[in-house]
Amino acid sequence: MVANMDSKTKLLNSAFAEFAKNGFLGATTRDIAKNAKINISAILYYFGGKRGLYTAVLQEIVQTVKDKSGNIWERCQEVEKNGSQEEALTLLKDLICRFLQLLCGDEISKDMKTVFFTEYSRPTAEFSILYDGLIFPVFRMMAALLTQASSGKIAIKDAYLYMFPLFSQLFVFASRQETICSFMEWSGYGKKEMQKLQEYMSQQIDFLLNKQK
């Protein structure tokens, strides 16, 4: 049983590397199996083929992000039900900062992030796995918390509109890291630089709320 689990893990790890390098269309099951040092028939056995393996890869991304998000999901549910305006604001900023850390830091592998951004920018038929499992839930939580932090002055539909550019900014910071660092004359995203990005995102929230006063 352990050997079977090891084989699946090796195939998943190899798949991440191949899909990150060549995309879904360019990656081949032959190369994935070869680099994993597993018989190619194991892909059909465990995943039903290339598309099933890609589905498993996207599901692994969703689960990894959730696992590394700590209790942020539970906190959002609690605050939405019973939280105050101040708690909603604090949690909204915490939520944005946490996902900024995950997208721009090194807690998630480079291959995993590359697969995510490629799927996000050039969706395949499996995009719903990321959208339904991760993207929409986070976006909806951000919008709901913004409405709550404004004491209802920002209607939920307006909050959706406000969140689109803010939500997209998270992906820009992550996917355009080299360009941003070049313009800012940063050597990379260290602790100081990440703090700067977090402060910027937090200021955007404050600006939106101050407009309602």
Image: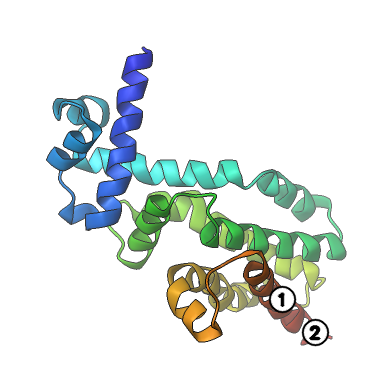
Return the residue at label 1.
205
On the picture, is 41 further left or further right than 200? left
Return the residue at label 2.
210
The image shows residue 132, relative to residue 3, as above or below, that is below
Q: Quadrant of residue 195?
A: bottom right
Furthest toward the front, the residue is: 187
Q: Quadrant of residue 110?
A: bottom left
User: Residue 12 placed where, x, y %?
Assistant: 32, 37
In the rendered image, the quadrant that contains the N terminus is top left
User: Residue 171 placed where, x, y %?
Assistant: 49, 68
On the picture, is 123 further left or further right than 211? left
In the rendered image, the quadrant that contains the C terminus is bottom right
Residue drawn at 52 percent across, 53 percent down: 106
User: Residue 169 placed where, x, y %?
Assistant: 54, 74
Note whether residue 69 is visible. Answer: yes
Residue drawn at 45 percent across, 49 percent down: 109
- Judge by depth and name the residue closer to the eye, 33 or 141: 33
